[in-house]
Image (cartoon, rainbow, N blue to C red):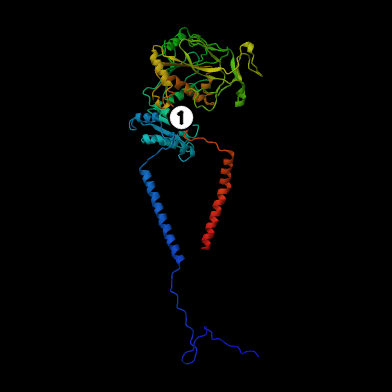
Amino acid sequence: MTAPARIEPSAALPAADESGLAAPPEEPPAAPRRTAPGRWRRLQRTAADGVFALLLLALVLTAGWLAARHDRTFDWSASARNSLTPASIALLERLPDADTAPLRITVFAPREHRVGRAVEQLLSRYRRHRPDLDIHWVDPQAAPERAREADVRLLGQVVIEHQGRRETLEVLSEGTLSSAIARLTLARAPWVAVLEGHGERALGGGAGPDIGRFAQLLRQRGFRLRPLDLASAPRVPDNTDLLVVTAPAIALFPGEADALVDYLAAGGNLLWLLDPGADGGDLRGLEPLAAYLGIRPLPGLVVDARAAEHGFETPTFTVVDDWPAHALGRDLSRHAVLPGSLALEAGPAPGWRLATRLTSGEQSWNETGPIRGEVTRNPDLGEVSGPLALALALSRPRPGADAATADAADANADADADERAITAKPPDEQRVIVVGDGDFASNAHLGTGENRELALRMVRWLTGLEDLIAPPPGPDDRDNFVLSAPRTWLIAVGGVFALPLLLAGLGLWITWRRSSA
């Protein structure tokens, strides 16, 4: 028989009150009301971010205001690449006040252009020492008339003017800018006499063979030019700093060549521009001058097989691009062209020494036969293979100077760049340049390659204005190192793949943590 089910009293059932009725269940106590913590934290974060942004903006504005009012520059590079050399600083300290003799610098480039910014970076070094520099910016496209007046051909050219004299710089660096300023601030402008009266290249002529453009460049750079006719003046004036002689069309009159030799014997400087002419190397009365210098032209005309590589149709265009480590060729990057040149040979001459020479290439020779069709070198006719001397630069102690002064001049020429004096060359050194072709400086060919710069450098070297400020050495404060192949691959793979993947994974992990919090 099954036992009857027994019901245990449950604790969940409500207890009965005195009336026997069940009492209603008691309600749990109400929880205290609280503000959501996430909302408060977001409010705090927004306020903190706003205060931080305001403080950062105030810091930036304050720093900009202080930088505008107090210009301070610190050069921490090992080679002082952002500072001027002591020679340039000394030059700026010697400049007269801007009120009496202002130095005006005009930059033909927009200031916001990348070329203008590079020029501004260099000029800022000069402004630190001379805030009164008069610097102007001209956009050549917006002001084409001013650009033509200043003979501007390249964006970024700089024109420097001082006391009515002017220099134009196409390649700008501390060396070129400081040298130009030093030349313009010389106390006396050099006198250049140009021989005429025998059918030479005209000093003021505008025809292709004339040298009118070259004369204009010299005048713009402060040189004072004057024609010299030995038929009316029996001797070269004593105050002549440089005599320029171009190839005459007719022979000199008796006694004129002797006057030129007397000028050299007295210590004068000479630029002699020869020409082959229709009858070979006939010097037309200038033979005594060649004998005094020990110069002998080789027969024929120099031909260069590389002329076609540079776009010239005739091989008589001789290319010069092997520049010597000398003031005539230092830092030149392009080639110069001599359209038709004699080859020169330097013989013994009392007291003269060869300072440097400009030569043709190895694929050149002095062709003595007619130049038409295919030409080849014939050694039996005295045709010598290159390199051949196209220009010879000679120097010697000036007659009358003692040996001690000459040694001091040589020591000054070889001095260190930072210790070189900011003056012209020693007055006790005499200099001569003989060029086998005067066409390179003519109106027709002055703008070809480096012809213009080469002609100017010849005149500067002859008058002693080539190294008023020595160009500073290039900055070299970065050590070179070579990575091995495994390290190179490690850096490449790590930078291209590993590091981006690591940053992306870190960002995803931070996002997941914030979303799950």
Q: On the image, which quarter does residue 177 sit in?
A: top left
Judged from this view, the residue extending furthest toward the top is: 254
Q: On the image, which quarter does residue 96 sit in?
A: top left
Coordinates of residue 8 in the picture (x, y in percent): 55, 86
Q: Which residue lies at the image location 39% right of the left edge and 30% below the top edge?
A: 86
- Residue 207 seen: no
Coordinates of residue 84 in the picture (x, y in percent): 41, 32
| SS at mark 1 in the image | loop
Q: On the image, which quarter does residue 173 sit in?
A: top left
Judged from this view, the residue extending furthest toward the bottom is: 19
Quadrant (top left, top right, bottom left, bottom right) of the N terminus: bottom right
Judged from this view, the residue extending furthest toward the front is: 1
Closer to the camera in the image, 328 or 313: 328
- Residue 146 seen: yes
Locate residue 272 relative to residue 88 in the image: left or right.
right
Q: Is residue 13 above or below residue 276?
A: below
Coordinates of residue 197 in the picture (x, y in percent): 47, 13
Query: Badge 1: few (under 14), some or many (20 or more) residues near its Cα, within 10 Å?
Result: few
Give the number of marks: 1
Locate residue 280 relative to residue 229 in the image: left or right.
right
Closer to the camera in the image, 446 or 75: 75
Coordinates of residue 343 in the picture (x, y in percent): 56, 15
Q: Which residue lies at the image location 45% right of the left edge and 19% below the top edge?
A: 462
Pointer 1 residue: 473
Q: Residue type at mark 1? A: Pro
